[in-house]
Image: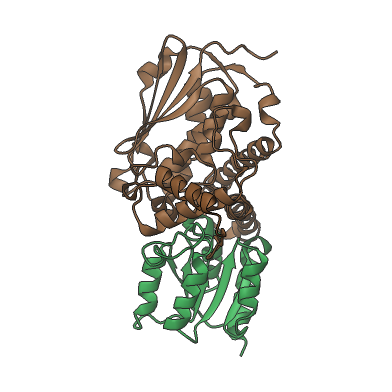
Chain colours: A green, B brown
């Protein structure tokens, strides 16, 4: 399994530590960003190569989405995803979130499944997450 | 999601009423952004269209808007769900890491993971209590339940105990727990008090979590807690030097589900913490008041002295 360089966007750094350490233990490189503003800056910087992005949905909107209705931050990741797609159309994205309502799940089910996977945080343990992520990356 | 277009018809009287409602509740200076204004006008619009929503919270049994508009209920529910699922997932994930990787970890790593798990377990416990209080209020039951008062010491049994359990949260934000200070001289002068320990601890938790979440830079982070005894009450003064409360929102921050635009931009949250904290202390016959908006933000928890110890 080759090493993957991952942009991991989530506002809860302490709680994401088990996932990040599991990824590192399996040989992957993780760039963690808790702010959507800084994460978008990295995506705009095309000297920053990423093989894959992991993205939460319920994140503070920061300055990037302050003028948009994010429904109290519960939908920030949807807007972030659209912007990410515009900046990096072929980047594989794993949406990893506690937000589990049908509207959000259907939104990502409608995406090209070669480029996007939707995973609910409570449904995967760190080692299972890494296995799913490896499979997704190796597919196609 | 707030509706984009709402047709309230051509009833001139209703339109006038709505216009007057907006004029009395909103002035441009009260809002820091157009989005802020739009969100709050939207909330009023929903309340206008569903006028059974109570405005007053003078009566503790009516303190929660039990008939909160469904559109707002959904957003608040999503936030509460997140606040509980997140610590639960973190505990499971840390447990899984320990079971699979413990042999390769050093003692410091194991200690850190155990501390994280303990913190998330405490946070989950408080979030579940928060949900319990919310559901009780919606069912109209809370005010009928007697307080379970007991004889406790405010500082060691409630304040210090609650905050010590949550210190990893502080470090998680890149903040220094040493910047949490207490006025111990006055605190220790207060003898045993009769309070519902679980409920007053919940208030400390809610204020503390807000102070950490809405802190600014690590070098300006500070929380100071003082207490004093007055003729008929005890007062816990909770001060922090975070983003503060914007002018014009001094009362609205106690509304169920309400979050200022600055708070929304900074961090996720349920918008229930202050509402429930105020309600819990009002059940004691006391109050939670905002004494100062910013630098420091100061809340006073007022607890009556004459509460009997429960049998």
Q: Is B50 in front, or is B88? A: B50
Residue B231 point in image, percent of width and height: 43, 9
**Position of residue A45 in the picture relative to residue A134 (left or right):** left
Q: In what quadrant of the picture does the N terminus of chain B appear?
A: bottom right
Q: Position of residue A10 (x, y in %)?
A: 49, 63
Residue B188 at x, y = what percent? 42, 16
Q: Residue at x 38, y 52 (%)?
A: B262
Q: In front here: B44 or A51?
A: B44
Please state the total of marks drawn on the protein image: 0
Toward which corner of the image does residue B105 lie, by quadrant? bottom right
Above-or-below relation of B302 to B258: above
Query: Which quadrant holds residue B129?
Result: top right
Q: Residue B61's quadrant in the figure?
A: top right
* Residue B292 seen in this snapshot: yes
Among all residues in the image, which is located at the extreme bottom? Answer: A140
At 48% from the left and 49% from the top, the residue drawn is B16
The residue under the point 64% across, 36% down is B133
Tell me which residue sits at (52%, 59%) in the image: A71
Question: In which quadrant is the C terminus of chain B drawn?
Answer: top right
B179 relative position to B119: left or right: left
Asked if residue B162 can be seen in this view, the reply is no
Q: Where residue B255 appears, x then y in whole percent? A: 51, 41
Q: Residue B99 or B23: which is nearer the viewer?
A: B23
Looking at this view, is B146 or A69 the one in front?
A69
User: Relative to residue B79, is residue B182 drawn left or right?
Assistant: left
């Amino acid at each position: 399994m080759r090493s993957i360089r991952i942009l991991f966007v989530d506002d809860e750094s302490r709680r994401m530590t088990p996932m990040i350490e599991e990824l590192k233990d399996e040989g992957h490189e993780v760039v963690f960003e808790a702010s959507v503003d800084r994460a978008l800056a990295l995506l705009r910087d095309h000297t920053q190569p990423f093989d894959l992005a992991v993205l939460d949905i319920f994140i503070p909107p920061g300055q990037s989405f302050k003028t948009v209705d994010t429904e109290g931050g519960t939908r920030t990741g949807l807007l972030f995803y659209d912007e990410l797609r515009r900046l990096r159309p072929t980047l594989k994205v794993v949406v990893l979130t506690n937000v589990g309502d049908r509207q959000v799940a259907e939104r990502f089910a409608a995406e090209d499944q070669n480029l996007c996977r939707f995973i609910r945080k409570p449904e995967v343990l760190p080692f299972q997450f890494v296995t799913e992520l490896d499979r997704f990356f190796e597919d196609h | 999601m707030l509706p984009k277009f709402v047709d309230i018809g051509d009833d001139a009287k209703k339109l006038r009423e709505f216009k007057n409602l907006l004029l009395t509740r909103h002035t441009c200076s009260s809002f820091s952004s157009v989005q802020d204004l739009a969100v709050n006008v939207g909330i009023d619009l929903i309340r206008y269209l569903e006028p059974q929503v109570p405005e007053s919270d003078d009566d503790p049994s009516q303190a929660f808007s039990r008939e909160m508009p469904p559109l707002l209920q959904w957003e608040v529910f999503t936030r509460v769900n997140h606040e509980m699922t997140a610590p639960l997932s973190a505990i499971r994930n840390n447990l899984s890491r320990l079971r699979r990787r413990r042999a390769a970890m050093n003692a410091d790593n194991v200690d850190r993971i155990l501390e994280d798990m303990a913190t998330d377990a405490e946070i989950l416990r408080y979030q579940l209590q928060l949900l319990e209080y919310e559901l009780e209020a919606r069912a109209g039951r809370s005010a009928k339940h007697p307080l379970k008062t007991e004889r406790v010491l405010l500082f060691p049994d409630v304040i210090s105990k609650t905050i010590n359990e949550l210190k990893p949260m502080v470090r998680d934000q890149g903040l220094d727990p040493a910047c949490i200070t207490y006025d111990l001289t006055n605190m220790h002068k207060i003898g045993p008090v009769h309070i519902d320990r679980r409920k007053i601890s919940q208030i400390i938790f809610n204020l503390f979590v807000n102070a950490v979440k809405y802190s600014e830079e690590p070098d300006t982070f500070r929380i100071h807690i003082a207490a004093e005894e007055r003729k008929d009450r005890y007062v816990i003064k909770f001060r922090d030097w975070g983003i503060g409360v914007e002018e014009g929102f001094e009362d609205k921050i106690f509304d169920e589900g309400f979050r200022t635009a600055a708070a929304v931009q900074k961090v996720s949250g349920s918008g229930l913490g202050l509402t429930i904290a105020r309600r819990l202390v009002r059940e004691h016959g006391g109050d939670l008041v905002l004494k100062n908006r910013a630098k420091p933000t100061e809340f006073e928890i007022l607890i009556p002295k004459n509460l009997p110890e429960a049998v």
